[in-house]
Amino acid sequence: MIRPQFYQYIQLEKRYSVNTVEAYKSDLAQFEGFIAERYGIEQDIEVTYAMIRSWLAALIDQGISARSVNRKLSSLKAYYRYLLKESLISQNPLKKAFSLNTPSRLPQFASVSEMERALEHNAQANTFEVSRDLLILEVFYCTGIRLSELINLRLSDVDYSACTIKVTGKRNKQRVIPVTKDLLKLINDYLILRSGVVSGGVQEIFVTNQGKKAYPVFIYRKVNYYLSRAGLSGVKSPHVLRHTFATHMLNEGADLMTVKELLGHSNISTTGIYTHVSNELLRKTYLNSHPRARKDK
């Protein structure tokens, strides 16, 4: 039922990431299976809003979170918008569909002291592996870039004279991020050690112990290890370091538009979640510090 041209469209024209395309495929395959089994429907033009509602209800009955249900609904909406755009259907069955209400969830971040502990571990060790691992954390924390952006950083993206790095984000949008001379020195020191590991041809900055381009699980494990040793509780992922960068920037007085540009957000509302984090931190500090507030608490 689901037309393969749609996946080509979102990958080549919309420039969605590989992970996003795979998520769409998974969501739409689930929907396709449900419609075929429940209603015997094999054509997307036969699907009605009532059928879609029954699928969403079944997902909720299975204990799927509202956030996950909304993601699947978003995938389905994108598919039917594509069909309408290509004149493959005359009416969108999702015209009346609304997303479920979800509780607001503040992003997790590390404290300044936790980051200091994470970056202190083996900081004096002059080996390729430790130098690389420490640099991974430093780049995440100092720039706020995404996991995919770090993996795809190339040697040519570092401008030592301008003290910047060029980052290629979602949909191949590029942005230039200022960095400190200290970070550039760490990069340079690491690259000297890296030259003894990489045989040639690999242009990406971060590589495995075998000199191959780093991959998502590899980077995730490194970040998880060092954040765990620093005593961070809860999720310990590269995205937590992105949240940490944004939160610490705002706490130190950076304006929201600057943080938005550094993070590569297309919409200011996406960056706005970090103001809630900062306000919540401010409230907790007040309740724990002011004598009257402690008494009231």
Image: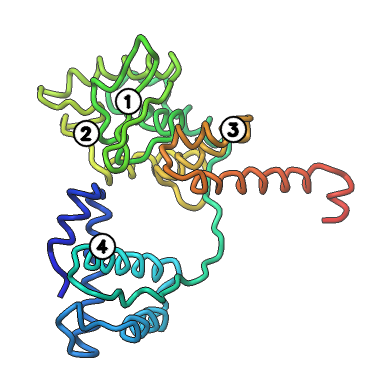
Q: Nearer the viewer, residue 77 or 127?
A: 77
Side of 54 where 117 appears, left or right: right
Could you give the CA–CA distance between mark 4 and mark 1, rounded to whole angstroms? 29 Å
Whether 61 is drawn above or below 281: the answer is below
Q: Residues within 10 Å of mark 2 (few under 14, many from 20)?
A: some
Q: Of marks 2 and 3, which one's residue comes earlier in the chain? A: 2
Q: Secondary structure at mark 4?
A: helix
Instruction: Tell me the quarter of the image containing the C terminus.
Output: bottom right
Looking at numbered disc 2 in the image, what kind of residue is underneath it?
Thr
Residue beneath disc 1: 166
Name the spot of residue 294 as percent of width and height, x first. 84, 50
Name the spot of residue 104 as percent of width and height, x first. 56, 60
Which quadrant of the structure image shows residue 105? bottom right
Q: Are marks 4 and 3 in contact (CB under 8 Å)?
A: no
Q: Can you tell which mark lies on residue 255?
A: 3
Side of 216 where 283 appears, left or right: right
Q: Are marks 4 and 2 in contact (CB under 8 Å)?
A: no
Q: Can you tell which mark lies on residue 24?
A: 4
Q: Of marks 4 and 2, which one's residue comes earlier in the chain? A: 4
Q: Of marks 1 and 3, which one's residue comes earlier in the chain? A: 1
Looking at numbered disc 4 in the image, what kind of residue is underneath it?
Tyr
